């Protein structure tokens, strides 16, 4: 059974994963805005494409990590719920 501190840590980790995902999406939006505003030198285009690729990979990994954590939480909470229910035989 998870302790209170462990539950809080898992929730904070999920929040951090979500924050990192928003950061990656924000970076992608910023890069796109700069490209559309013609504020980039042609030499910067290669760097922008590299950053976008990194951003996309990060977002994918962040999404994977969030799904894993959420699935683990569901299993752990289901186990806790099952263990917390009074057994009919124990009445």
Image (cartoon, rainbow, N blue to C red):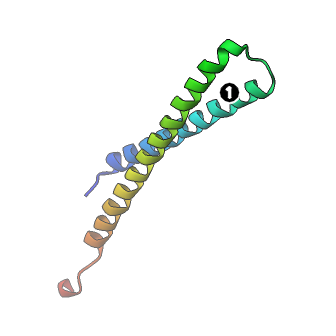
Q: Residue 73 at x, y = what percent?
A: 37, 56
Instruction: Identify whether 38 is placed above or below 53.
Output: above
Apparent side of residue 18 relative to residue 35 in the rendered image (left or right): left
Task: Using the rendered view, name the quadrant where residue 42 is placed.
Answer: top right
Task: Using the rendered view, name the quadrant where residue 77 is placed.
Answer: bottom left
At x 23%, y 86%, the residue is 88
Apparent side of residue 59 relative to residue 2 in the rendered image (left or right): right
Instruction: Identify whether 40 is placed above or below 4.
Output: above
How packed mark 1 is, by other alpha carbons closer than 10 Å (few <14, some 14-19, many 20 or more), is some
- Please identify the quadrant where the C terminus is shown: bottom left
Q: Residue 44 at x, y = what percent?
A: 66, 15
Q: Residue 13 at x, y = what percent?
A: 42, 42
The local secondary structure at tag 1 comes to helix
Single out the residue that lies furthest toward the left.
Answer: 89
- Please identify the quadrant where the N terminus is shown: bottom left
Q: Residue 65 at x, y = what percent?
A: 41, 45
Observer-nearest residue: 21 or 38? Answer: 38
Observer-nearest residue: 39 or 20? Answer: 39
Which residue bears the numbered disc 1?
Answer: 31
At x 44%, y 41%, the residue is 61
At x 54%, y 39%, the residue is 21
Q: How many numbered markers are drawn?
A: 1
Task: Using the rendered view, name the quadrant where residue 25 is placed.
Answer: top right
Apparent side of residue 80 relative to residue 49 in the rendered image (left or right): left
């Amino acid at each position: 059974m998870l302790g209170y501190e462990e539950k809080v840590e898992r929730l904070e980790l999920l929040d951090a994963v979500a924050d990192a995902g928003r950061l990656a999406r924000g970076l992608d939006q910023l890069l796109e805005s700069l490209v559309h505003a013609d504020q980039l030198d042609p030499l910067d285009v290669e760097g922008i494409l590299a950053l976008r690729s990194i951003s996309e990979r990060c977002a994918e990994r962040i999404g994977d990590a969030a799904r894993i954590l959420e699935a683990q939480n569901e299993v752990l909470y289901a186990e806790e719920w099952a263990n917390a229910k009074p057994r009919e035989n124990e009445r």
